[in-house]
Amino acid sequence: MLRRFALLFAAPLILAAAGTPPPTITQVSNAGSWRTAGLSASGIAQGSIFTILGNNLGPSTCASPTTPPLPTQLCNVTIAVTVNSTSVAPYIYDMFYGTYISAILPSLTPTGNGTITVTYNNQTSSAYPIQVVATAFGTFTANSQGLGQASVTDWPNYNLNTIIHTLHPGDTAILWGTGLGPISGSDADTPPVGNIGSPTVYVGNTPVTAGSGLLYAGRSGGWPGLDQINFTVPQGVQGCYVPIAVETAGGIGNIGTIAVSAPGTNTCSDSVMGQDLITKLASGSSVNFAYLRLVSINLRFNGLAVSGALGNGDYARATFSGFTPQTAFNANYGVSSGYCIAGPYDVDDQSTAQLDAGTGLSLSGPLSAPGPITPDYPGGGYYYLLLNQNINKFLFSAYQYTISGPGGAAVGTFSVADTTQIPSAQLSGGVTSQSFSRSNDLTLQWTFSNTALQNAPVILGGASFSSDQSLVGEFECSLPAGTQKFTVPAWVLSTLPPTGMSKQGAETIPLGYLWVGQYNNPTTFSTQGLDRGIFTDIFFQGSLVTFQ
């Protein structure tokens, strides 16, 4: 009788499963770095936490395990990794909405190229390629996207480092991430404590190693797969956005930032938001800040202007961001002066409270494109407009542009004008058409033609794309006013992919570039709902190059 009832209830379940699409995997990456396969440190390290993105990976909701040991099956979901004919079952941390799974790759997984599959309700995904390595570290960041403020705490209080809770030279800090390497024993249980490998931590421009400030690098001893690196903040480091990265045998992973101030202070002072707004955040109040920019890009190859998305394309960008003391870690605006950061750096902040400034902003000026500057999503505070990609038109000097806002749910009406600067900084020293090694430091020089901007900060940048443009790496360096020479560290350049080539007409061009620019003095504005807004412009001029 029980068997008859079991068969009756099983029939509709089988029919339902047959109509459900099988799982599909679209990305597998280190849970800290989110590095795309093919970039440095993008392999999945033995014993590390990794993420799977896709569709129909599991149920829309699933209760995650709260204590070790972690299971290999959760909510009818299992994972299989196969390398060199050996299959292992990763331990599952959690999953969300059927589109995301985080898990731990067992330390005993063989290294090499392999595949990964996800099975949900007896349906298995197609095999997805995966590279298993001994070590490839990813730094966790406060926004869980591999960008911006690194997950670094002070010691011994374990307070999260932010622009209103800074570190100081000589302090002991703890960097959190995953991927230092394998352990002995089960990765499902609380891991053993002990040093793993010999990583190098880059803090600003200073390498920190064993015997010179690296105090511990191994499992946290609290949660499976979670690594911590204890280090001493080097002397001479200071800024709201000091880069921090970890190098292992697998290369450099993602580059985050930390906030470091002088002893006796708990806030930093060099954010574009202004010291007064940082002080307001530190006092316990919220801050609403708007950042509006016009950006002009002028790239040349063999003396000729380059058209297309890689070359010249002026655009307008605006963000309206809300911050609280609890979300101050999202106030990310570039990199502090004297340092470089790598990654998709054209992200003004990662605020989870983007402010509604209206359905679209209007831009008026001599070369503006028709149509409003529209939000990236309804009610969002990120606004963008590509002005033109005409190689004969740029946001040249003495042109006045006005951005106006109709007002939205959080920001009142406003209108602010900016008179663009003269394109000033120009790379020198025969950069055009050159090839550069990604494993060596790169020293660049440039000249200025606009004396009115001698006090303006200098921005140096570069990028490299693969031939099919599926891989991209970028870097940006912020430099003091008047700087005319700078060396980009090899550890920053190593995060770029090798440069591919593209055919444009009869010309074969490299898909890499170097450029330099200067920010104009910002115009400040205010309106209801904002503590401050600024509007500025920057011209980048540079050349197409090859990174080998």
Image (cartoon, rainbow, N blue to C red):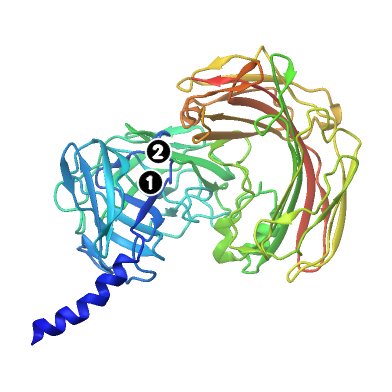
First in sequence, mark 1 or 2: give its number: 1
* Label annotation for residue 29: 1
**Would you identify the image quadrant in which residue 356 lies?**
bottom right
Q: Residue at x 70, y 53 (%)?
A: 273
Q: Are marks 1 and 2 in contact (CB under 8 Å)?
A: yes
User: Which residue is denoted by mark 2 in the rendering?
Assistant: 37
Q: Nearer the viewer, residue 219 or 280?
A: 219
311 lies above or below 215: above
Q: Position of residue 226 (x, y in %)?
A: 31, 53
Q: Secondary structure at mark 1?
A: strand
Q: Distance between the Cα atoms at labels 1 and 2?
A: 7 Å
Q: Nearer the viewer, residue 324 or 277?
A: 324
Residue 11 falls left or right of residue 375: left
Q: Amino acid at mark 2?
A: Ala
Q: Secondary structure at mark 2?
A: loop
Q: Position of residue 40 (x, y in %)?
A: 41, 33
Q: Position of residue 120 (x, y in %)?
A: 28, 62
Circle 1 packing at 10 Å, graded few (<14), some (14-19), many (20+), is many
Q: Residue at x 26, y 39 (%)?
A: 114
413 lies above or below 31: below
Q: Residue at x 48, y 56 (%)?
A: 142
Circle 2 packing at 10 Å, graded few (<14), some (14-19), many (20+), is some
Q: Position of residue 372 (x, y in %)?
A: 80, 54
Residue 223 seen anywhere in this rendered image of the structure: no
Q: Amino acid at mark 1?
A: Ser
How many numbered marks are there?
2
Residue 111 falls left or right of residue 207: left
